Image: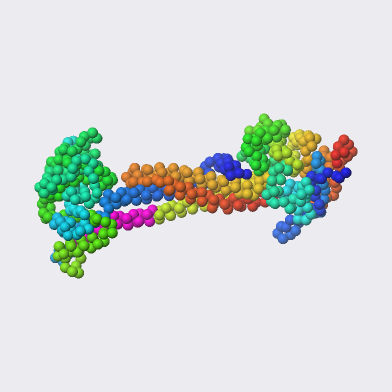
Amino acid sequence: MTMLQGFQIALHALRLNPLRSFLTMLGIVIGVASIVTVFAIGSGAQLRLQEQIRSIGANVLMITPGAVYQGGVRLKDGSKLTMTESDVQAILEQIPEIQAAAGSIAGTAQVIHESKNWNTTINGTTTGHFMVRDWQLATGRYFSGAEEAGAGKVVILGSTVARELFAPGDDPIGAQIRIMKVPLEVVGVLDRKGPAQDDVAFVPLSTAKLRFLGSASNINRDSVAYIIAKVAADGQMAGARTEIENLLRQRHRVPAGQDDDFKVQDPAAAMEAQQGAIRTVALLLVAIASVSLLVGGISIMNVMIVSVTERTREIGIRRALGGRMRDIRLQFLCEALVLCLLGGAIGVAGGITLSMTVARMAGWITSIDGEAIGLALVFSIATGLIFGFYPAHKASRLSPIDALKTE
Amino acid sequence: MTAPLPLISLRSVSKTYRTDGVAVAAVRNVSFDIAQGEIVAVMGPSGSGKSTLMNMIGLLDLPSEGAVYLEGANVAELSEDRRSLLRARSIGFVFQSYNLLARHNAIENVALPLVYCGVGRKARLARAETSLQAVGMLHRAHHFPRQLSGGEQQRVAIARALIASPLIVLADEPTGALDSRTGAEILALFAALNRDGQTIVMITHDPGIATQCRRTIRLHDGELVSDETLFQLLPKRSAVS
């Protein structure tokens, strides 16, 4: 008897009892579907992070305000904007490893163009910001020196904002938009960097301070919310970081022994760590999903054992008519394999549907890769072989004489 | 002139079963030969060892002592796989309770032994048709066993036994579950097959059936008590044996 004949006999036997066959493979269906879904969500989350890491740019350090003491009370990180534009200047001038640096302040506001409006992040910064992040223009230009110095009424749009405010054929360059009642001229539209990054509008730092945030209590004319700086080469990250820390401690007159009033971070490294965490969680979930595959395998074994008992006479007949022990074993092994493969295939289809539903309903990014599907199918074949072997072996060991005697 | 090699030879065959530590001798020291073209009835009351004997002739079981030879080969010396293959190719079983697979139709049942001979599906079904034709059941080829009468099921079972052109057909109480008229039809079918040269061994406890066979082997308590060939009833055939 060949493998093919084994599968034909198996399919014939399973078709006779469709409900039972389906219920038997349900465990595998659920197991495989959950593995595929977890994989899809996990790799989607990783893709999103990778995109964020890429969008930050290579070799970027981020300096944010740290905890400050005010009359002996330690305030929350960032409750006081301790960084200033002159810090940016000092970093640029005094630390040779730094190629570019820019300070930013940011908030959210409604941007309005004619009848359309959109809520987005308004980032007040300098052209250095785009240099640090390797962010090219799709069209238009960056801020001019005069605009940066004189609170020019200009704006550079992220591609999402441009898409939301302008009809597809319209050229945004030169158009007037309004942010908090201030009319601004669009001078540039940025390249796409990723859905999370493109939803932003940039104005010169001076414009943001003077026209939008002017009188906020914790802002003085010189301060910025954070600084980003680009280090020339990968190997210089640690050195540049120490130099920035020393320079800022000195400039902020932080006494020896007291905590910094700022924090220097490497966002890409932090995200890579986060990515590792996501991978761990995803693996954990896959492990849990594998348990249901195990349960599915046990249920297949159970049904197969019952089926062997029920079909003892058939086994006897087949043996009497010339079936070898290995033919009987192959026949039942094929049944288990068909159950698992069919369950696996339905599970893959279910997993893809489920992850696409999750993607649509929760707005998560999911990514279905062949690797996950292949792995799930390999798992189901392994389950079939492992849990099908014992019943098949049992069937093949039946004495044909005794088997023929059973009713 | 040397006598032709017998198809089947039993030499001092005994079979002892051990159940719960107690040894039960089902067959004791039985010897006989069956030649090509014979039709033999094996008779005896229940428990006389008929079925055990048939299992050994059919290569389903091995003797505890003595030896069974199929075409001169000691079957105990063959591998289990080889014996399985011989069951498929050289032996055709007919059972009292037909033993058709309920979930397969007549033609699939008939073709089943060929699956284990490695015959492809098309050839299997073609040969199954021929075999069904031979027992007059071609018109029922696509019926399932439950849609057939007892006699019809037994005809399908005989077609299955014949499909691989076996050396010997082994029938275990083939009419035991049938009414007398249908039983007579099945016996007539066996007789016709035998006239065409098919060797048949039939197990029965019905003396009426035994009288229709030229040779009758009687068993009692596992021992062979008589082995008679009825030369006088069929003088024309005497030359063969």
Q: What residue do we see at 89% from left, 38% from top? A: B232
Give percent across and percent down for residue A187. Answer: 17, 41
Quadrant (top left, top right, bottom left, bottom right) of the N terminus of chain B: top right
Identify the residue at horizontal 41%, vertical 44% (top origin). A352
Magenta stretch mostly in which secondary structure? Answer: helix
**Colour mapping:** rainbow
Left or right position of A201 against A374: left
Q: Indicate left or right for A37 with B120 as reference.
A: left
Location of residue A157 by image quarter: top left
x and y, in percent, of residue A51 in the image: 30, 49
Q: Residue at x 73, y 48 (%)?
A: B59
Query: Where A163 falls versus A100 (above or below)?
Result: above
- Pick the residue in front: A45 or B146: A45
Count of numbered circles in the view: 0
* Vertical order, A286 against B177 (above or below): below
* Image coordinates for residue B43, horizontal then vertical, percent: 80, 45
Query: Is residue B25 visible to the viewer in this orientation of the structure?
Result: no
Task: Name the residue: 11% across, 49% down.
Answer: A149
Give the camera-side residue of A237 and B65.
A237
Q: Position of residue A248 (x, y in %)?
A: 17, 62
Give the residues drawn in magenta, as a range: A261-282
**Quarter of the image that includes the C terminus of chain B:** top right
Find out whether residue A276 is within the magenta segment.
yes
